[in-house]
Amino acid sequence: MADVDQLKLWVDNEVSVLEEPRPGWYVLGVLSLLMGFASISTDLYLPAMPLMSSSLHAGTGLIEWTISGYLVGFSFGQLLWGPLSDRYGRRLAIGSGLILFVLGSVGCALSNDALTLIAWRVVQALGACASVALSRAMVRDLYEGTKAAQMLSTLITVMAVMPLVGPLLGGQIVWMSGWRAIFWFLVAVGLVTLGALCTIPETLPQRNRNTEPLGRALFSYFELLRNRRLLGYLGAGGFLYAGMFAYVAGTPFVYISYYHFPARLYGLLFGMGIIGIMGANILNRWLIGRFGYDRILVAGAIAASATGMWAGFAAHSGLGGLWGLVMPLFLFASTTGLIVANSITGALTDFPQRAGAVSALTGAVQYGSGIFGSGLVGLWGDGTPWPLGLVVALSGVGCLLSTVLLLHSRK
């Protein structure tokens, strides 16, 4: 009798899955917008950083800490939003985060000193991280395995338009209206996204929600960190993000202040890396259907290690000047398309019932690593490209070592 009941339950579940419609392109578009909050909240104001330093009478290192402060809120906030979304649903958690993001953006626009700006950037990040972490969990709610990796690559490709356009748009906003206008623009983006969120369905059905107490759910992060395979995936993405946020924090000063590249055209150089990421994500979507996401992840880590060391050499030697550094940084950034979606998919695959928590932990590690990457560039800043090149080189090697750990654990 028990077997009959189990069979009936299985049939009911299968029928309910078949009856659930696949998301349309509008839903996927909203998910791309949510995933892009990390980029749009940072890349848009990169061209304004030298002007902000002058306006707020703050040093270069202190202004670079506006990125590090953002990453502090972004990484730790995800650890709370993940379990909340597993228990109460994705939309409620994301909507609450968007309201917090809007309040933080208003605070940034009204700041009159660098420390106040850093504090409001933390608040802004605490709200923005819900959108990024939980949009990944929503993809896992809708897809599994290789299909999930392919959809993440597609969404990241679409999302990459934001950091491509962001510095260019930000440069024009600064030129026309000053750096504060950037944060008022982010207020409008947050409100529009909140409206779009209300038009898409909840992806986590009531029957699949985690009913354990929130305190127990938070404690279970320690259990997840005991999984060696998960650590390999987390490390691969985390080290890459350390290098990428070193790139984000360091290139405005290296390109504009050291090499005297025009600030209003900075977005063109920054956009080269974004184009590389988009191309690699398109390639990744095709490759993982043939070789699997683990193999492509390893290939991407090898490339990140090689190009990171090349960037370190170019930054230290000055060989080739500006373009001698731009090229390896472009290639290093491009490896994001071969690493991020595959490392996230690998991390989520073994924990389908805890997708929100695992996605949050993945994001916390990635953006927490970004704290160290951007922070070290500011801490070691000496007015030359060398600190940027050194952090990128170390990050690439760490990414490769993490995949070695992953392969060993799978063996």
Image (cartoon, grey):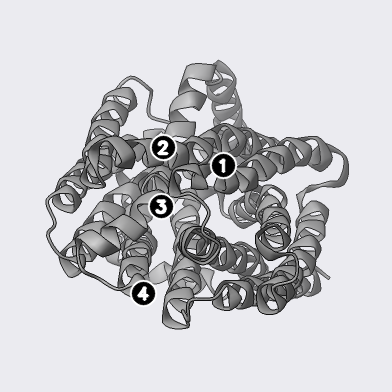
Q: Residue at x 76, y 49 (%)?
A: 293
Please identify the quarter of the rendering in which residue 177 is found. top left
Report the side of 166 relative to 409 (left or right): left
The quadrant of the picture occupied by the C terminus is bottom right
Crowd class of label 1 (few under 14; some 14 to 19; many from 20; radius 10 Å): some
Which residue position is annotated with label 4? Answer: 61
Dot placed on the residue nearer the N-terminal end, 2 or 1? 2
Dot placed on the residue nearer the N-terminal end, 1 or 4? 4
**Residue 35 image point, x, y percent:** 46, 41
Crowd class of label 2 (few under 14; some 14 to 19; many from 20; radius 10 Å): many
Q: Residue at x 62, y 64 (%)?
A: 240
Which residue position is annotated with label 1? Answer: 268
* Distance (Cα) linking label 2 and label 1: 24 Å
Which residue position is annotated with label 3? Answer: 46
**Type of the residue with mark 4:** Gly
Please identify the quarter of the rendering in which residue 350 is found. bottom right
**Residue 47 image point, x, y percent:** 40, 50
Looking at this view, name the residue that lies furthest to the right: 290
**Type of the residue with mark 2:** Leu
Dot placed on the residue nearer the N-terminal end, 1 or 3? 3
* Distance (Cα) linking label 1 and label 4: 24 Å
Label 4, secondary structure: give it.
Answer: helix
Dot placed on the residue nearer the N-terminal end, 4 or 3? 3
Eye-nearest disc, 1 or 3: 1
Which residue position is annotated with label 2? Answer: 34
Residues at marks 2 and 1 touching, judged by CB atoms closer than 8 Å: no
